[in-house]
Each structure stands twice: as structure tokens, then as C-alpha cells.
Image (cartoon, rainbow, N blue to C red):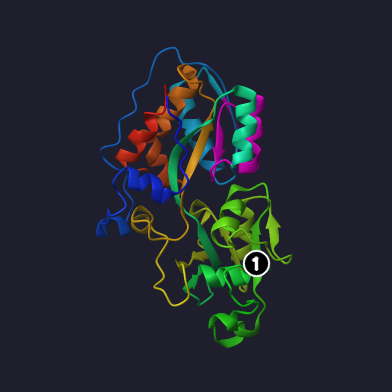
């Protein structure tokens, strides 16, 4: 079976013919695609499942696992979410069967796996995310460009942006204008860190002043408690103490909200696919417990959990393409 590696949310939506899909209804309450398959349980599913990887996906993996175990009491699942960079070595060493990641594997990670197994890992897209750039809820700013974000977060500023250190440089008036921008981010083990570094910093270097956090919840908590702060994380970690900014690629362009419609239409600059990687030998079936877990994740019930956790569900056509990767 051919292995498919998805490099961007735009790529997979284009494959499914959904990039131009837009609807006013999508801007309101998110509903899962009614064409998603209803999960039908199988008999005799049991065993142990270990999941090691993304912090962004940690809550989702936990919720999916809890619901899956309610269907299969003889399945024991352990979930560990310390960052996407921990998934490839755990999958390669065989200490986990599931490798959740908020970014695609790097070439060197794929090579290490392939050296061990003589075939490539399989990436299963399991949900969509509009990676959020958050400010405190009382900050009056509404939008930024990726160029401005580069100026805020990066010391190399490959976009050509000026060094941005105060809120007044971004057009904020009043007492906040003279305040230094307090920057929160993730640590280097995080796939979200890597995604932000690639897509916003153009692979440049973060400023030394970035307060690196071990998890997304800590980033959002920091921003919610400090008026002059800014940070980034998966949209599923948004709380009432922060707001997610509209973003544009370039200065002067119209900024778009991080909502479902804009991610599906490939308009939001930081839309992305979230993955679970598995070791699937060509021509050989996955273990029943791994296959059934992923079938559940890609089902209507599994995608409803995606929405409840604050992320964005897969359209039925996309979920169908992912399900076809499962032997």
C-alpha cells in the first residue's frame, strides 16, 4: 500500500476537492459532517495501546481513549503527551503503537524509523487545527500579519520585519502602548513550536526572551494572566481569558479569523492537520486494537469528540481517504 505524507492542511483538502468549500453555516456552531461513518464495534478487541507524542493532541487522545475503552473494556490505553518530537523515537523503538503529532515527521525521523523497520511510517490525519495566536482578552488588538509575528517572536526576522518590542509599534493606544510585549511559546520538543518556527519565523530563530512552556495549557494560562502578553497554541486550548487573533500573511492584507470555514478554504495562514503515526508494514494488517481505535477516531462519534475538545473535524471525504490507509 502506498504511504501518504501530508505536508499541509491545504494539500489534503485539495486532494478531497474541498479547498473552495465555503458556507455561512460553518462560521457559526461547528457540526460534524453527517456523511461521516457511524462506528460499528467489533468482537474480541483487546490488548494494550500506548500513545506517546503531541501535547496538542494529548486531551483529544485521552478523550478518544476513554470512549474507546467504554466500548472495549478489555483494552488498556496509556497516553503520554510531552511533545511531537517524542513520538518518532517511541514509535521506532516499539514502546508505543500510536504516535500523535501536530506536525509531519521530519526527514531524519522518517529515516530513523525506516532504518529500523525497512518501511516508512504511516501518517493518519485525525483532525484539523487553526493554530491560534492568543492575546489577553482585554488587549484591544484584533489582528496581526505573519510578518508582524516574525518581528515579535524572532531575532533573525527572515520576513524582513522590523524588531517589534512594544504594543505601540503595533498600533495599540493608551497605557498598553508603551508596555513591552511579553512573549510566551512552546519548547523545542513541541510540534507546535516547530510548525510556528517554519511557517511564521521562516525557519529563523526565536528571541531569547520567549518564555518557553512545557505545554499548551501553560502558554494560554500565561497569556490570560498578563495583559501585555502574546502566545501561540492549538485552538483547542483557548479559554475565556484569551482571544485568538485574525491573521494575514503580509502587512496590509485582509486578516482572516481562525475559524472552520477559513481553514477548510485554506485561507487561515496557520491551518494545519493533526496526525497519528503508526507502524504499518506493507501488505500486513494493523493489529485489531490499533485499527479499531483509528476507525473510531475517524468515525462520526470520534469527530464529535474533536469538536467537543475545541478542534476542527475532518470532512467525510477527508476521513474516508485516511481510513483507506488502514489495512
Quadrant position of the C terminus in the picture: top left
How many numbered circles are shown?
Answer: 1
Q: Residue at 50% x, 59% y: name it.
A: 132
Q: Residue at 38% x, 55% y: name it.
A: 263
User: Could you say which is closer to the camera, residue 55 or residue 225?
Assistant: 55
User: Could you say which is closer to the camera, residue 277 or residue 281?
Assistant: 281
**Picture coordinates of residue 192, whole percent (x, y):** 58, 51
**Picture coordinates of residue 285, whole percent (x, y):** 46, 17
Q: Is residue 287 left or right of residue 40?
A: right
Q: Is residue 312 visible?
A: no
| Element on which disc 1 rests | loop
* Image: magenta residue range: 77-105
Which residue is farthest right?
A: 208
Which residue is farthest bottom?
A: 174
Q: Vertical placement of 202 versus 147: above or below?
A: above
Quadrant position of the N terminus in the picture: top left
**Picture coordinates of residue 292, whole percent (x, y):** 43, 23
- Asked if residue 87 is among those painted magenta in the image, a careful observer would answer yes
Q: Vertical placement of 157 versus 28: above or below?
A: below
**Picture coordinates of residue 160, whole percent (x, y):** 58, 73
- Asked if residue 160 is among those painted magenta in the image, a careful observer would answer no
Q: Is residue 260 left or right of residue 122?
A: left
Q: Vertical placement of 99 versus 1: above or below?
A: below
Q: Is residue 121 left or right of residue 35?
A: right
Q: Is residue 30 left or right of residue 112?
A: left
Mark 1 lies on residue: 154
Q: Is residue 40 visible?
A: yes
**Label 1, residues with CA under 10 Å away: few <14, some 14-19, many ≥20:** many
Amino acid at each position: 500500500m502506498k504511504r501518504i505524507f501530508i505536508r499541509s492542511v491545504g494539500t489534503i483538502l485539495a486532494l478531497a476537492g474541498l479547498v473552495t468549500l465555503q458556507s455561512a453555516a460553518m462560521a457559526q456552531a461547528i457540526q460534524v459532517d453527517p456523511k461521516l461513518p457511524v462506528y460499528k464495534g467489533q468482537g474480541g478487541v483487546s490488548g494494550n495501546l500506548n500513545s506517546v507524542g503531541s501535547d496538542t493532541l494529548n486531551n483529544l487522545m485521552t478523550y478518544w481513549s476513554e470512549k474507546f475503552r467504554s466500548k472495549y473494556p478489555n483494552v488498556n490505553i496509556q497516553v503520554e503527551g510531552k511533545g511531537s518530537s517524542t513520538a518518532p523515537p517511541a514509535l521506532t523503538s516499539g514502546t508505543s503503537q500510536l504516535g500523535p503529532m501536530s506536525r509531519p515527521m521530519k526527514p531524519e525521523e522518517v529515516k530513523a524509523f525506516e532504518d529500523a523497520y525497512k518501511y516508512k511510517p504511516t501518517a493518519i490525519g485525525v483532525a484539523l487545527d487553526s493554530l491560534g495566536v492568543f492575546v489577553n482578552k482585554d488587549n484591544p488588538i484584533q489582528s496581526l500579519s505573519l510578518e508582524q509575528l516574525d518581528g515579535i517572536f524572532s531575532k533573525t526576522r527572515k520576513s524582513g520585519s522590523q524588531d517589534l518590542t512594544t504594543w505601540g509599534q503595533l498600533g495599540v493606544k493608551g497605557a498598553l502602548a508603551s508596555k513591552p510585549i511579553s512573549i510566551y511559546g512552546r519548547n523545542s520538543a513541541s510540534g507546535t513550536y516547530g510548525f510556528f518556527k517554519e511557517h511564521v519565523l521562516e525557519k529563523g530563530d526565536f528571541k531569547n526572551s520567549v518564555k518557553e512552556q512545557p505545554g499548551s495549557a501553560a502558554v494560554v494560562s500565561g497569556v490570560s494572566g498578563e495583559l501585555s502578553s502574546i502566545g501561540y497554541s492549538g485552538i483547542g486550548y483557548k479559554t475565556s481569558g484569551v482571544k485568538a487573533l485574525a491573521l494575514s500573511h503580509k502587512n496590509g492584507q485582509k486578516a482572516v479569523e481562525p475559524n472552520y470555514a477559513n481553514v477548510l478554504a485554506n485561507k487561515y495562514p496557520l491551518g494545519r492537520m493533526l496526525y497519528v503515526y503508526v507502524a504499518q508494514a506493507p501488505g500486513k494488517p494493523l493489529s485489531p486494537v490499533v485499527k479499531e481505535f483509528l476507525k473510531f477516531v475517524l468515525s462520526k462519534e470520534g469527530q464529535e469528540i474533536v469538536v467537543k475538545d475545541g478542534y476542527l473535524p475532518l470532512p467525510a471525504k477527508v476521513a474516508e481517504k485516511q481510513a483507506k490507509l488502514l489495512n
